[in-house]
Image (tube, rainbow, N blue to C red):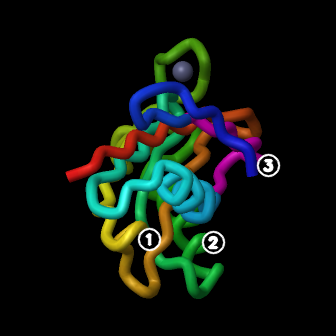
Amino acid sequence: MSFVDLESGLYRFDVGTGSHTQMIDITRQVQEIVAHSGIVSGICVVFIPHTTAAITINENADPDVQTDFCKEINKIVPWEDNYLHFEGNSAAHLKSSMMGFSETVIIHKGRLLLGTWQGIYLLEYDGSRTRKVYVKVMPG
Ligand code: ZN
């Protein structure tokens, strides 16, 4: 796993997505950054600087949840619906804003304070591409 240590608790890593709509578990990468930072108690912000991808937290046990999640959101926001946007990816822009561009997770005893079944996910809505993810960790 490689990440870039930028400055003052700010880190970045890249994720290559493999399909058009995809949910990728990035919990391990974020946890490695938290461990590297040495912060035992604090806050971790995971942020994606893109307009057709998003960050969320959801179940990491049954992979069918990810398949259902992608399938249903594509029904809620269909890819084709006479959108005006010249790039042709309005659906991806909409889904990204619906899901959001960041998550905040508590750091407790040097680890991300996530529920047993929770993972942090990068949501790809206009892949495949290389996506940047920023992680900011703050003691407190
Ligand atoms: Zn666009």
Q: Residue at x 55, y 78 (%)?
A: 60
Amino acid type, label 3: Gly
Identify residue type, mark 1: Asn
Label 3: which secondary element: loop
Task: For the residues labelled 1 and 3, say whether their Cβ atoms are less than 8 Å apart.
Answer: no
Mark 2 vs mark 1, foreground winner is 1
Residue on which the image places disc 2: 67
Residue 53 at what x, y percent from top left?
Answer: 53, 39
Residue 113 falls inside the magenta stretch: no
The residue drawn where x is 64% and y is 80% is: 63
- Report, in whole angstroms, how far the alpha carbon at label 2 lies from the one at label 3: 14 Å
Disc number at residue 18? 3
Structural distance between the alpha carbons of marks 2 and 1: 12 Å
Distance of label 1 from label 3 (alpha carbons)? 20 Å
On the image, the x and y values in percent for residue 81 come to 50, 36
Q: Which residue is mark 1?
A: 58
Few, some or many residues within 10 Å of mark 3 (<14, 14–19, 20+): some
Q: Which mark is residue 138?
A: none
Disc 2 marks a residue whose amino acid type is: Thr
The vertical placement of 83 against 20, above or below, is above
What residue range appears in magenta? Answer: 12-22
In front here: 35 or 18?
A: 35
Provide residue 122's location: percent of width, then percent of height.
55, 51
| Residue 105 appears anywhere in the view | yes
Q: Residue at x 58, y 71 (%)?
A: 66
Residue 118, image quadrant: bottom left
Query: Residue 67 vs residue 20: left or right?
Result: left
Kindly indicate the quadrant of the structure image that contains residue 62.
Answer: bottom right
Q: Position of residue 124 (x, y in %)?
A: 60, 46
Answer whether residue 81 is visible to the viewer in this image: no
